[in-house]
Image (tube, grey):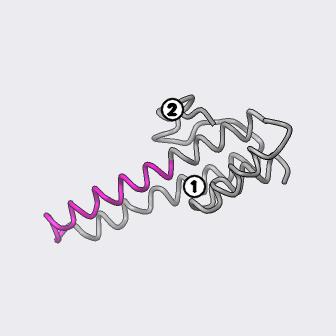
Amino acid sequence: MTNRTMAIVAYITLIGWVVAYLSYRKSDDKSPFVQYHLSQSLGIIIFSIALSIASGILVGILPSMATLFYIISLCPFILMLLGIITASNEAQRPIPLIGKLVEGKFNL
């Protein structure tokens, strides 16, 4: 896989992240571009899990707000799309909302 392809695949669910990570580990060229997008994607995955747990708890407490919480739960999907667009443009820009928080946190 090329570096660009690995960066894009990293954003496609957890399985895509694992495939991109294993391809990155196996490659001889440890590209900082791929490493950056792997860490951004991992941040989105962790954010998605935390948001899902919090949303489930809050929907249990406030069932009348369920529609709002389901709309908010689309946020990780939108962040993944933005990450795919950034990776396909071969840029290293942080993802909105959480990109700065995870930048440099994961040693891949």
3D distance between C-alphas at marks 2 and 1:
15 Å
Badge 2: how crowded within 10 Å, few (<14), some, or many (20+)?
some
Foreground of the two, 103 or 87: 103
Check residue 51 for magenta coloring: yes
Q: Position of residue 15 (x, y in %)?
A: 61, 62
Q: Which residue is drawn at 77% across and 42% down?
A: 90
Circle count: 2
Chain part drawn in magenta: 44-64
Residue that lies at the very extreme toward the top in this rendered image: 104
Q: Is residue 39 above or below residue 100?
A: below
Q: Where is residue 72 in the image (x, y as percent from the top left)?
A: 36, 59
Q: Where is residue 80 in the image (x, y as percent from the top left)?
A: 57, 55
Task: Give the residue number, with chain letter if any, for mark 2.
Answer: 100
Task: Quadrant for the C terminus, please.
Answer: top right
**Residue type, numbered disc 1:** Met
Foreground of the two, 40 or 87: 40
Badge 1: how crowded within 10 Å, few (<14), some, or many (20+)?
many
Q: Is residue 17 above or below residue 71?
A: above
Residue that lies at the very extreme toward the left in this rendered image: 61
The local secondary structure at tag 2 comes to helix
Task: Give the residue number, with chain letter if any, for mark 1.
Answer: 80
Q: Which quarter of the picture shows residue 27?
A: top right
**Residue type, numbered disc 2:** Lys
Left or right: 9 as drawn, with respect to 67? right
Q: In this view, does 46 lie above or below 55?
A: above
Foreground of the two, 18 or 53: 18
Majority secondary structure in the magenta region: helix
Q: Which quarter of the picture shows residue 60?
A: bottom left
Q: Which residue is drawn at 64% across and 44% down?
A: 38
